[in-house]
Image (tube, rainbow, N blue to C red):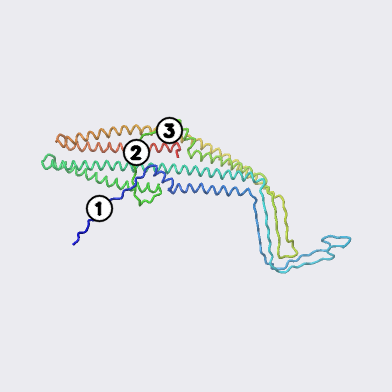
Amino acid sequence: MAIAEEAPALRPAVLEPVTLPQAVQSSLDNNVQIKNSRLDVEINDAKISSARTRIFPEFHMNAVGLQLLAPLEFDFNKGVFGNFKATGPIPAEKINVTTDQRPVLFLNTSLVQPITQISRIRLAIRQAELSKSIAQQKYRLQKQQVSNQVRRAYYRILESEDNLKVLDSTRQMFREIERVSTNYLANKMVLPAELLEVKQQLANVEYETLKLSNAIANQKEELSRLLGRDIKNDFQLAHTPDTKLTEMDLRDAQGRALTQRAELLQTSFQTQQLDLERRIRKQQQLPQMSLVMNYFSIFGAQILPKNVIFAGLLVHWEPMETLRKSYEISEQKKLIQQSSNSLKDLQTQILIEVNTTHRTLQECKQFVQVAALGRELAAEKLRVVSNKYKEKAALLKDVLQAQKDLTQADNRATQATLALWTARADFEKAIGED
């Protein structure tokens, strides 16, 4: 009987690590909110093209097919077309002309070229271009916000994975303490309650490990949503970002924020739009004048003219419209003043945000150094007391306390690093970095 070959053990698939720049770029390419903001810019392109067509002449054509329900009757009185010496009155007597009940086609075409409205149309085009500029700044702002969200989510996962490593190290430590304590219990060197405390601490660490693993899975699904990825496709993160910071002078940061923050540019464009609207309302107070060329013809009625063509000026003016527009202009002036006030207040808010994030960044940088030294000290204390416990020169409670201190120090160091990364991301967002 042939011996079946043993199937090779299945190895877990190796996931390609995703770096932070790759994650940010993926979000910029695939995030739904960013895609919608990009479409808004394209929509405004179409609006600009539509507004530009208003400058060209307007062509209108109307064709009406009619069926006469009653004959057309025309009475021509004697001499209606004149009275001449050679012929006498035309017609010489009253004439009645009647048409048949036949289909009639009425065709009317006109060509209208705006004249005085062109300046107003150009202002409307400029308004549409400003709308596109506002949409572009919203697009920039959306990218900055999503990038910041991606960085924060990325850093949270890194923090959770670092905490998971700490828990894994703690679990290994408690298993070793459990092994040693079990031997000590056999030799009656520790109490049963002390061994039970070790087992309870080990079970608690395993529970925290499971809970943190589930939290990491949730965080990865949320990050996948931001990146526009399928949440069913797992991934792993690359090594942690560099904690070294490039120093930036606060004055320089404030200046960059005031020149490149999307919110400021957006509000500035909105103020310009309001001013253009005021100028458009002022133009609407003037009479509207257009050059008109018109052609119409009636087919089917023999006694009516076949072709009529004329050109002229069309003037439209409504006196009450001038009064209404004056009130609207007054309204626009107040809206412009409101927008200017909002712009000044927004500048102040942005400067405060830059100052706050800059101070927080400096604090976090210092906190990382403090937390790193605290972790190093706690690790050394645990090493010393663990060796003493194995040599029966220290109590179990001292080992447990030292392990607890190290876990707290590890968590503090991880939180300090996360706070530094987050503060750096918030500072870059505050100065309007793309």
Left or right: 388, with 226 as reference point: left
**Placement of 392 over or under 63, stated as above or below:** above
* Residue pointed to by mark 1: 9
**Which of the 4 image quadrants contains residue 163?**
top left
Which residue type does callout 3 highlight? Asn
Q: Earlier in the sequence, mark 2 or mark 3?
A: 3
- Residue at the far left: name it: 187
Label 2 vs label 3, nearer the camera: 2
Q: Earlier in the sequence, mark 3 or mark 1?
A: 1
Q: Residues within 10 Å of mark 2 (few under 14, many from 20)?
A: many
Residue 6 drawn at (x, y percent): 22, 56
CA distance separating discs 2 and 1: 38 Å
Q: Give the quadrant of the C terminus.
A: top left
Which residue type does callout 2 highlight? Leu
* Residue pointed to by mark 3: 355
Mark 3–mark 1 contact, CB under 8 Å? no
Label 3 vs label 1, nearer the camera: 1
* Residue pointed to by mark 2: 418
Identity of the residue drawn at 31% across and 43% down: 161
Residue 145 drawn at (x, y percent): 43, 42
CA distance separating discs 2 and 3: 20 Å
Label 2 vs label 1, nearer the camera: 1
